[in-house]
Amino acid sequence: MDAGLAAVIGALAGSLGTIGAALATERTKRVSAEIAARAEHRKSRREPRESAYKEYIDSVVALLDWEYLDNEPNQDGALRPLLVNIRNAWQNAALAGPLEINAPSERLMYACVDFRVVARNRAKSDFSAPRELVSEAKKEIRVCLSLFVKAAQVALEDDGSRRRLRD
């Protein structure tokens, strides 16, 4: 092999090495940019969801903290603003998504509405209906709240990197 051919082969090998290094560097940059974009997307999605879920939980806890009083004829008037807050917070939580949060959030909202119906019916019956019905309705709210919190935690932990199997 003469020196000229060796020089050409050496230059070609050097060029191929440079091209390979450039491609590897570009791929690394692209992967790093995708990771950064995914992290930013995850953060931008998590914060509004977390806020909506917290607002919903806080509004339900306010209902649970509300003291049911026997012989108080205006029970429904006191409950109405609490339930309006719960409904608004439920809508925000449902809109924040994902779809998997809708069933537990809706079940919780209906448990709160059922509590209002129990309290109203007890007041309309001159408080002759069993007081245990009120306790049972609050117990159902606590069960539904626990299910919603678990679903919210799963939704907040989802970073979008796992593929979901659809039916």
Image: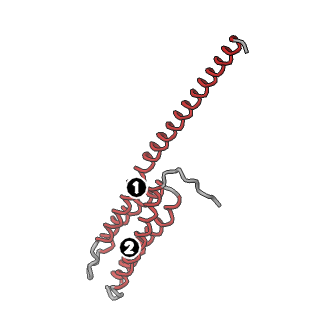
Q: Is residue 12 left or right of residue 138?
A: right
Q: Amino acid at mark 1?
A: Ala
Residue beneath the point at 36% across and 58% down: 55
- The percent position of residue 42, horizontal first and vertical second, equals 46, 47
The picture quadrant where one finds residue 140 is: bottom left
- The residue most toward the top is 4
Of the image marks 2 and 1, the number of the one nearer the N terminus:
1
Identify the residue at the far right of this view: 1
Residue sitting nearer the eye, 10 or 117 = 10
Determine the image quadrant of residue 6: top right
Mark 2 lies on residue = 142
Query: Within 10 Å of the Cα at label 1, are there few (<14), some (14-19), or many (20+) other Cα atoms?
Result: many
Q: Residue at the location (27% across, 82% down)?
A: 70
Q: Nearer the viewer, residue 36 or 93?
A: 36
Q: Is residue 126 left or right of residue 27?
A: left
Label 2 to label 1: alpha-carbon separation: 19 Å
Number of the label disc, if any, that sits on residue 52: 1
